[in-house]
Amino acid sequence: MKTIQYELQDGVATITFNEPNSPVNTMCLQWQQDMSALVAQVLKDQDAIKGIILTSAKSTFFAGADLKGAMRLRPSDAGAIFTEIELVKKNFRTLETLGKPVVSCLNGTALGGGWEVALVGHYRIAVDDRKTQFGLPEVTLGLLPGASGVTKMTRHLGLMGAQPYLVEGKTFSPKEAKSLGLVHELVAPGDTAATEMRTKALAWIAANPSAQHPWEAKGYKVPGGLPSSPAVAQMLVVAPAMIKQQTRGLYPAPEAIMACMVEGLQVDIPTALRIESRYLAKLMTGINARAMINTFFFNLNAIKSGQSRPSQSPRFKPAKVGLLGAGMMGAGIAFAQASKGIATVLKDVSQEKADLGKSYSARITQARVDKGRMSATDQQTILERIHATDQVADLAGCDLIIEAVFENRELKAKVTQEAEPMLAPGGFFASNTSTLPISGLAKASAAADKFIGIHFFSPVDKMKLVEIIRGRQTSEDTVARAYDYVQAIGKMPIVVNDSRGFFTSRVFGTFVMEGVAMLGEGIPAAAIENAGIQCGMPVGPLAVLDETSLTLSLHVMEQTRADFEAEGKTYVASPGEALLVNLVKEHQRPGRAGGAGFYEYPAERGVKKFLWPQLKPLFEKADVQWDITDLKDRLLYRQAVETARCLSENVLTSVHDANIGSIFGIGFPAWTGGAMQFIYGMGMDAFVTRADALAARFGAGFALTDEVKAAITRYQPVY
Ligand SMILES: NC(=O)c1ccc[n+]([C@@H]2O[C@H](COP(=O)([O-])OP(=O)(O)OC[C@H]3O[C@@H](n4cnc5c(N)ncnc54)[C@H](O)[C@@H]3O)[C@@H](O)[C@H]2O)c1
């Protein structure tokens, strides 16, 4: 056995998982074969065995399924997958129904398949380490815990009790596991933890010679009752509808898990396990799981491990970072930095404004203190790290200064020249601009190689993504430092090359303007907004444009037009631009902040916003024909085409940055796996055919040139 060590001593069989050439244990093909060999060995030795201990030689217990293999699966593989899962469970079941006590000694994290291995033990002992996580997050990858996870957790915790851990994929600490009854004993972390766990395991084995899982005993009652009991039956009327509402029918896994829980409780264990295998085989070979695994496992890991970070540069640890502008963004960034231990100088034009910016951190931390999620001491430490000031000189010695002043080129140039001399030797300067090309802003800098874009999203506290923009002259060392800074404050960096709107603002612009173009065609605003929600965007294009401001969009368009004219280039207005001018200038509807946009924002408390009734007489056409599938496709395809163009133009240089950036920066629906995975998931031919058809009816925004098609093919990931 290559991945499992087996030792039988004094009647105790110790099974140690230890996959070679891997930092973690996985359910790889070799492990599956080894498990069959192991079970055969245990059966041979069973007369001599008094008990079994499951343990790991890695720093974690067991990581779970081999996801690379899952990326190669297609619907035609469902039968083979069913057989494979059934074999894994047959081996588990042989061990746990042998009539011998089995103890899992959990030295570290056990997630997904790893937690299902842990659940083979009748008794579970864990090291109470803060880093350790247990649970079944399969749903977040479009999967279902099919190696007995659904069956066992539902029987342990009941239908209601198990829901958060199965349908939502909530993970839990060793302490929480203990309070849920999923772990029976905890030991303190440290050098002696392994020995202590073993001692406890041996004692339990000696005291429970013929252990079994609780539900194997006659008369076992599932907590909360069976689906036929009145309380559960009542819950079952509501729960599926709630799931449907949350997933909008776009994510099959939560529904499949719920169905599997309910069906599994009404049959015996072997049948429940078979039902589970069927559901898993279907999910695992479907398009959604592939998209989610690709993005939420492989792409996220690529970002964490720094695949877009220039690898030659040494690691950078920011100690002191200055922020120019204590407005909405500056205040948010200050809190993000200070809570990660970075000394922060928050500068504005007056002490009053700087203090106001700092008060944002005071408010956020106070809310956490009030909820018991932060200690008053921690709050004080964070606030003490933020020095609010109106003095440029206070920026002296900063490793990095980020400007977040008004979106105005002249002002940005002025503050750059004022603050740059304050940088510590080797320090660098960044702009948080959301629209102005970085290479142009860098002209104001005395060291363009040390000038970069670090584009945060609002609200900074909630948005994990940060877009790093490499200007024409930005050095690779500066890119690496910006990457390290973003990771140091716990955010997710993507790296793009400079271009108008970079990646996220550019693609986001195509989404909202496609919505405005539809309105210009006479399609009802409510239908447009509904299409946005139905395809999985967080909000409709008109509502989000109201939030980001119609005036701002118009300002950016005017600025772009002026830049194009100055460069002697032809500016082509997007189809919705005239309508936007009309709304802002003729009808004084600047957006949410101005109290009026596509929506009305009633001042009365509790009265919700509603679409401005005048949109109907002004823009809707009674004879317009539209189809919801077309509307949904237009909103998604327009963004996917623009993302592919970004790859083709070298604005983006990786698919993981494209996918993660589109989901976390723009709100591109997660069920697709991101804007590029949307294309790869459906296949190049199908995508091109549909995009061509949309281009023929709705314009050049959907047109794919040969270069763009070549870029899509060139960047296609291979698993
Ligand atoms: N608001 C967003 O959603 C968002 C998102 C990403 C990026 N951005 C960009 O971030 C920047 C700031 O945006 P915001 O929404 O925080 O603006 P804001 O209007 O809330 O804040 C700007 C702040 O800059 C201050 N300021 C002006 N001149 C200054 C100077 N000489 N020195 C120091 N401070 C000065 C102002 O007093 C004000 O407090 C802009 O470039 C914007 O495009 C904004």
Image: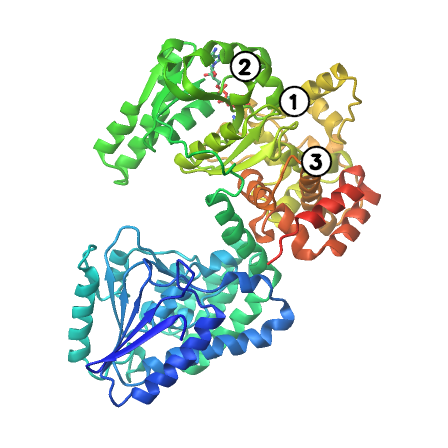
| Crowding at mark 3 (Cα within 10 Å: few <14, some 14-19, many 20+) | some
Q: Position of residue 607 (x, y in %)?
A: 50, 35
Calculate the distance from the C-alpha at mark 2 to the C-alpha at mark 1.
23 Å
Please name the amino acid that badge 1 sits on: Val
Q: Quadrant of residue 389?
A: top left
Mark 3: C-beta under 8 Å from nearest atom of ligand 1: no
Q: Which residue is mark 3?
A: 649
Placement of 185 over or under 358, stated as above or below = below
Q: Is residue 374 visible?
A: yes
Please name the amino acid that badge 3 sits on: Glu
Q: Which residue is mark 2?
A: 445
Q: Position of residue 176 (x, y in %)?
A: 27, 57
Residue visible at 63% across and 29% down in the picture: 501
Q: Is residue 552 left or right of residue 53?
A: right
Q: Nearer the viewer, residue 711 or 292?
A: 711
- Residue at the farthest right position: 696
Nearer the camera: disc 1 or disc 3: 3
Q: Position of residue 391 (x, y in %)?
A: 38, 9
Say what secondary structure mark 3 lies in.
loop
Calculate the distance from the C-alpha at mark 1 to the C-alpha at mark 3.
21 Å
Q: Which dot marks residue 321? A: none
Q: Which dot marks residue 556? A: 1
Position of the N terminus, as image quadrant, is bottom left
Is the residue under label 3 in contact with that under label 2 (CB below 8 Å)? no
Q: Which of disc 3 and disc 2 is earlier in sequence?
A: 2
| Crowding at mark 2 (Cα within 10 Å: few <14, some 14-19, many 20+) | many
Say what secondary structure mark 2 lies in.
loop
Say what secondary structure mark 1 lies in.
helix
Residue visible at 53% across and 78% down in the picture: 83
Please name the amino acid that badge 2 sits on: Ser
